[in-house]
Image (tube, rainbow, N blue to C red):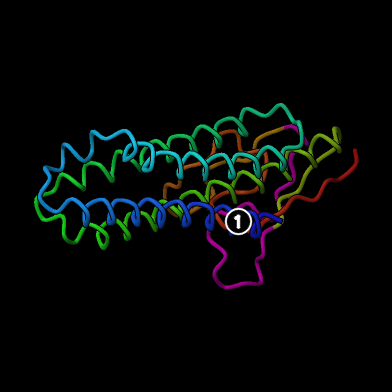
Amino acid sequence: MPAADALAASAAWKGASQEAVAFISLVMRNNPHKPIEAILARSDVQSALTWPFNNAADKSKAIIENAFAGLDSPFKDSVKNDLDGMAAEAPVKITSEMKDPERQTLAQRLLAWLQKLERRAAMAVDVGTTRAITELNALQAHSGFKMWVAQIEELNTCSHCRGLHGMVIPWDQEFPYNTGQRNLGVYGDLQGPPRHPNCRCHLVFIPA
Ligand SMILES: [Zn+2]
């Protein structure tokens, strides 16, 4: 269930964000006149900013690992690397924001950025788990053809997925990337959905 996985990932990152912001707010309240560099140099501050995000990344990676269920997929590793990158990015961003002279509004400014981080992590997990379903189904079929099926009856289905709808290709080949109206990045090697985050497409495998 990719949607539920994405929600679980988002909740983990939200928890990490709240924890980190609460901690630095407390430290700054308790040290109103201390130079920010001195506060940031403290190892308890550094680890309080780092470990909640590493923890959120670990939870998200566990969801991905479980979804791929032992499949040796390069895609699985790229999603996990993305999640590690996000975990590393958060403390750096928080630290640089803390150095801002107008740091009274730190919590508000950070909140907006951290919400973006939560969405990005949820998206990465959603894309990863959807991709796992595609890879596992392809592995199971291992012959014949596959057909891309989009939710064409729904108005908000994008032009990329609409363009792919009904396309039949051999089970182990890539779908084309150029079906939409504008340039849309692809998660490399388009063996099947997702074409983009929140993609509701699926494959139908057709025996040879
Ligand atoms: Zn789609």
* Image coords of residue 148 (percent x, y): 71, 51
Nearest the camera: 81 or 145? Answer: 81
Q: Indicate yes or no whether the magenta region holds residue 111.
A: no
The quarter of the rendering in which ligand 1 is drawn is bottom right
* Up/down of 127 relative to 107, above or below: above
Residue 82, position as x, y percentages in the image: 48, 36
Queried on whether the Cβ of the residue with tag 1 lies below 8 angstroms from ligand 1, the answer reads no
Image coords of residue 130 (percent x, y): 66, 48
Compared with 43, 114 (above or below) is below
* The C terminus - image quarter: top right
Identify the residue shown where x is 81% and y is 40%. Answer: 145
Count residues near mark 1 (Cα–Cα under 10 Å), then give few for <14, some for 14-19, many for 20+.
Answer: some
Count of numbered badges drawn on the protein = 1
Name the residue beneath numbered marker 1: 8
Seen in the picture, residue 129 relative to 3 is either above or below; the reply is above
Give coordinates of residue 175: x percent, y percent. Answer: 64, 40
Q: Secondary structure at mark 1?
A: helix
Residue 170, located in which quarter of the rendered image?
A: top right
* Dominant secondary structure of the residues highlighted in magenta in the image: loop
The kind of residue on which mark 1 rests is Ala
Task: Tell me which segment is drawn in magenta.
Answer: 150-172
Identify the residue at horizontal 32%, vertical 33% (top origin).
43
Give the farthest residue toward the front: 30
Position of the N terminus by quadrant: bottom right
Nearer to me, 128 or 196: 128
Identify which residue is drawn at 57% across, 73% down: 155
Task: Please tell me which residue is depicted at 42% across the width and 40% down the height of the picture.
Answer: 86
